[in-house]
Image (spheres, helix red, strand yellow):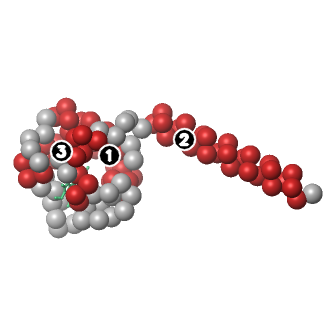
């Protein structure tokens, strides 16, 4: 009586895991690892834990429904800007590892917002 139930339950878990994996693969742009290293993003951020800076997942959640977010965050990555999370502003690119092109900022923000 119990065994078939358990089989059904684990089958369901496997299906759910597949759906999550497939959905994630479709929705997420690839991680721009070289850019992230060059700009030392992970010196202050992590994907899912608040550290010196808000986590990328918190940032994505905050801006998910904001159609202006992509452009605003790209400008902030390239030029710096007002602090939205606390007293510490994000330093400009020269202090993070070198100049950042608008195209690279676009790639980075798209990735952050997909977390
Ligand atoms: C020296 C530490 C540091 C580094 C390096 C850094 N950040 Fe940040 N970042 C911060 C801090 C602090 C904040 C919070 C600023 C605020 O209150 O708006 C922040 C905020 C952000 C935000 C949200 C901005 C907003 O207006 O809400 C994004 C997006 C972001 N960082 C992406 C990145 C990316 C991508 C990189 C690598 C290119 C990076 N950060 C590198 C410290 C850093």
Element assignment for label 3: helix
The reply to whether callout 1 and callout 2 are in contact (CB within 8 Å) is no
Give the side of residue 15 with respect to residue 111, left or right. right
Q: Where does the image place residue 73, in percent across and percent down from the top left?
A: 22, 45
Question: Which residue is denoted by mark 2 in the rendering?
Answer: 21
104, above or below 95, in the image: above
Answer few, some or many: residues within 10 Å of disc 1's Cα (few below 14, many 20 plus, some between 14 and 19). Answer: many
Tell me if label 1 and label 3 are in contact, CB under 8 Å. no
Q: Earlier in the sequence, mark 1 or mark 2?
A: 2
State the image quarter where residue 45 is shown: bottom left
Label 1 belongs to which residue? Answer: 112
Q: Which mark is residue 38?
A: 3
Q: Secondary structure at mark 2?
A: helix
**Of labels 1 and 3, the one closer to you:** 3
Reply above or below: 66 against 62: above
Q: Is mark 2 within 8 Å of ligand 1?
A: no
Quadrant of the image for the N terminus?
Answer: bottom right
Cα distance between the residues tagged 1 and 2: 18 Å
């Amino acid at each position: 009586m119990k065994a078939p139930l358990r089989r059904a339950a684990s089958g369901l878990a496997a299906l759910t895991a597949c759906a999550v994996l497939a959905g994630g693969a479709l929705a997420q742009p690839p991680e721009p690892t070289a850019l992230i290293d060059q700009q030392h993003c992970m010196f202050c951020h992590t994907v899912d834990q608040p550290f010196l800076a808000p986590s990328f997942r918190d940032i994505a959640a905050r801006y998910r429904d904001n159609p202006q977010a992509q452009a605003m965050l790209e400008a902030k990555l390239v030029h710096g800007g007002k602090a939205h999370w606390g007293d510490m502003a994000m330093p400009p690119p020269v202090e993070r590892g070198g100049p950042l092109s608008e195209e690279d900022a676009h790639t980075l923000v798209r990735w952050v917002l997909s977390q």
